[in-house]
C-alpha cells in the first residue's frame, strides 16, 4: 500500500510539472508574443548519464555545479539539456498550436526563448556576480526587469538590441570579462520552470502577473553594473552553463 501511495504522489508531481511547462510556454507565446521552442532536455531514465545521476544529485542538489548529462549525442555538451537540437532554433514560434503540440509530446522539455528581434535579449553572468549586480541596481533605484536564475548563472532580460548597439557600448569599456555573456539576435535563453543539466531555472525577479508583456530595461541602463559586478567577482573557471 505504501508503495502504491508513493507511486501516486510521483505521478501527481510529474503531471503538475508537465502542466507548468506547457502553461509557461503558452504564456510566453500567446500573451507576450515571445518565440519559443523546446530544448533538447536531459536523458530519459536509464539513458546515458542516468546511472551516475543519483550520486551526483545527492551531493550537488543545492550547488548545481555538476552536469547531469544531455539528451543530445555530444558526450561533452557544454550546455546539457539547455540548447536547441530537434527542432533547431529557426523553428522558434509564438504559434499556440505548435507550442501546444511540442509540449504535449515532450511535456518535460526545457523552454527556450529565441532572443532578439521582437523578443527580449538578455545578459547573463555567474550567479554570485548576478546577485551582486541585482543588489547594486536596487541600491541605485533601477528596475532590473525579469531575472532568470539557475544554480550557476543569472540572466537579466533586456529590450532587444542590435549587434551595432552592443558593440558601441562594449567598445567604450576598458575591460569586459569573459564570464559576461550576451544573448542577442540568433541566440537563446532557457526560461523557467525548465530543468537542465545545471539545475532548475527559476524567476529571481518574476514578471508581473497579467497578460501584458513584461517591461524590459534598455541594455544601456544595466550593462555598467553587470560589467563591474563581473570584474569584481572571481571567476571560478567553470565551463559554460545556463
Image: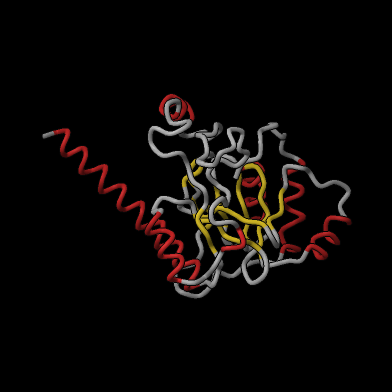
Question: Residue 112 lies in what quarter of the image?
Answer: bottom right
The answer to whether residue 195 is above or below residue 116 is above
Total tally of numbered discs in the picture: 0
Question: Which quadrant would the N terminus be assigned to in this image?
Answer: top left
Give how far across and how far down residue 62 sits, in percent: 47, 34
From the viewer's perspective, tell me whether residue 238 is left or right of residue 147. right
Q: Position of residue 45 (x, y in %)?
A: 38, 36
Q: Residue at x 67, y 67 (%)?
A: 159
Q: Position of residue 63 (x, y in %)?
A: 52, 33
User: Front-most of 141 and 11?
Assistant: 11
Q: Residue at x 66, y 40 (%)?
A: 240
Residue 108 at x, y = what percent? Answer: 41, 50
Quadrant assignment for the C terminus: top right
**Residue sitting at the far bottom:** 212
Extreme residue in the left direction: 1
The foreground one among 205 and 162 is 162
The answer to whether 70 appears left or right of 129 in the picture is left
Query: From the viewer's perspective, is 199 left or right of 103?
Result: right
**Quarter residue 158 falls in:** bottom right
Task: Give the camera-side residue of 110 and 71.
Answer: 71
Q: How is the image coloured?
A: secondary structure
Report the residue at 48% width, 30% height from top: 49
Amino acid at each position: 500500500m505504501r508503495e502504491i501511495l508513493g507511486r501516486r504522489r510521483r505521478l501527481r508531481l510529474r503531471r503538475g510539472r508537465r502542466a507548468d511547462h506547457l502553461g509557461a510556454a503558452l504564456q510566453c507565446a500567446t500573451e507576450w508574443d515571445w518565440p519559443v521552442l523546446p530544448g533538447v532536455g536531459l536523458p530519459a531514465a536509464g539513458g546515458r548519464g542516468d546511472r551516475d545521476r543519483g550520486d551526483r544529485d545527492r551531493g550537488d542538489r543545492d550547488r548545481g555545479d555538476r552536469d547531469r548529462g544531455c539528451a543530445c549525442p555530444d558526450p561533452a555538451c557544454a550546455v546539457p539539456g539547455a540548447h536547441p537540437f530537434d527542432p533547431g532554433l529557426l523553428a522558434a514560434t509564438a504559434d499556440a498550436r505548435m507550442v501546444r503540440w511540442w509540449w504535449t509530446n515532450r511535456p518535460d522539455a526545457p523552454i527556450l526563448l529565441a532572443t532578439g528581434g521582437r523578443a527580449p535579449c538578455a545578459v547573463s553572468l555567474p550567479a554570485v556576480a548576478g546577485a551582486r549586480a541585482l543588489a547594486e541596481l536596487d541600491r541605485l533605484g533601477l528596475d532590473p526587469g525579469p531575472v532568470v536564475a539557475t544554480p550557476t548563472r543569472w540572466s537579466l532580460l533586456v529590450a532587444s538590441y542590435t549587434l551595432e548597439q552592443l558593440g558601441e557600448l562594449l567598445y567604450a569599456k576598458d575591460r569586459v570579462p569573459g564570464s559576461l555573456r550576451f544573448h542577442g539576435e540568433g541566440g537563446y535563453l532557457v526560461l523557467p520552470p525548465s530543468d537542465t543539466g545545471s539545475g532548475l531555472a527559476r524567476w529571481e525577479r518574476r514578471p508581473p502577473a497579467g497578460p501584458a508583456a513584461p517591461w524590459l530595461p534598455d541594455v544601456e541602463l544595466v550593462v555598467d553594473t553587470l560589467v563591474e559586478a563581473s570584474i569584481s567577482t572571481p571567476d571560478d573557471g567553470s565551463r559554460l552553463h545556463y
